[in-house]
Amino acid sequence: MVRRPLGNHHHGPDTFLVTSDTTRTQGTQRTQQVAADAENETGNETGAEAGTGAADLRESITRARVVLWDFDGPICRLFAGYSAEGVADGLVEWLEGRGLHHLLTESERASLDPHVVLRAVDRRRPGSDLVAELEERLTQEELKATSSAMPTAYADPLIRTLTALGKRLAITTNNSPRVVASYLATRGLTSCFAPHVYGRTQQLRHLKPHPHCLNLALRATGSAPGTALMIGDTPSDFLAARDAGVPFLGYARNERKAKLLRGAGATQVVHSLEPVLTAIRSL
């Protein structure tokens, strides 16, 4: 059975068109969970941090000719139903099974982030077949995760609204571009971004916070840094945007993430994409 997106027809933050009563129920539950997660994680927040009001958001969007999106976080929670910690453990076990445990420090072996493991091996065996194989293993795990990825509340209608307003969109991510393409296809969003998806390659030194993928997007869209806006949810997103000279809008689904962004230097942070959508609909 196939789940198909409904294009611009939304009831709430996300809507699915399904081909059976069973899948329809699953799609509705998934949509309701998106909205519930957003509400629970923002608590009593209005959706925007103090100083990030509607006028600020409208100005940021109005100024932007191109909007650069991080993928895992602002667009979806890639590992919502598939443990990133388990993926990291799997990579560590794979290395240990080949007698390569010495390539990781104790803290790297205990990391919950697969990218920490990948970067560590790349630092010690740069450009090797080992790094290429490890990166491919991570890509395959990410592809498995797309089937249970949770759409970020209001992301789909925001993406479609920005496209309708004539904004150019690009994805700048540390995830594999194959994973991004797979997810966008399931949501009917491919045309909003294609061909501008810039993700992880085997040149791991270019992962954010390096601004490489942002610079690729700017060059490909013919955009000056000051005419762009990046939407990201981690300090590495902010640092990459800062180094590329791109204005930054932080998305933090909870206060812990908001504190990390503010600690890195981000000044414009929202707890939900709803106020961003509301602001641009008033343009």
Image (cartoon, helix red, strand yellow):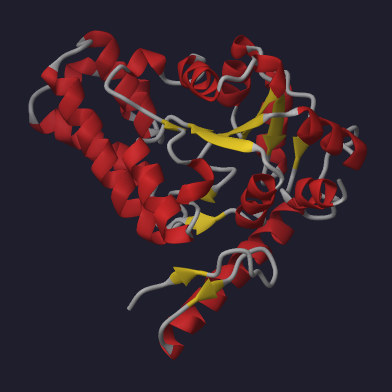
Residue 258 in picture, x, y percent from top left? 71, 35
**Closest to the observer, 205 or 185:** 185
Q: Is residue 98 above or below residue 55?
A: above
Residue placed at 29% from the left, 53% from the top? Answer: 144
Q: Work out which quarter of the rendered image holds the C terminus and state it.
A: top right
So how many labels did they put on this image?
0
Is residue 195 in sight in this rendering? yes
**Res. 39 image quadrant:** bottom right
Residue placed at 25% from the left, 18% from the top? Answer: 121
Relative to 57, 176 lies left or right = left
Relative to 4, 60 lies left or right = right
Q: Is residue 198 above or below residue 49?
A: above
| Residue found at the far bottom of this picture | 21
**Res. 245 image quadrant:** top right
Residue 100 in picture, x, y percent from top left? 13, 21
Q: Is residue 47 above or below residue 12?
A: above
Is residue 72 in sight in this rendering? no
Residue placed at 60% from the left, 36% from the top? Answer: 168
Residue 157 in picture, x, y percent from top left? 65, 57
**Res. 89 image quadrant:** top left
Residue 72 in picture, x, y percent from top left? 50, 42
Q: Is residue 114 above or below residue 263?
A: below
Q: Work out which quarter of the rendered image holds the N terminus and state it.
A: bottom left
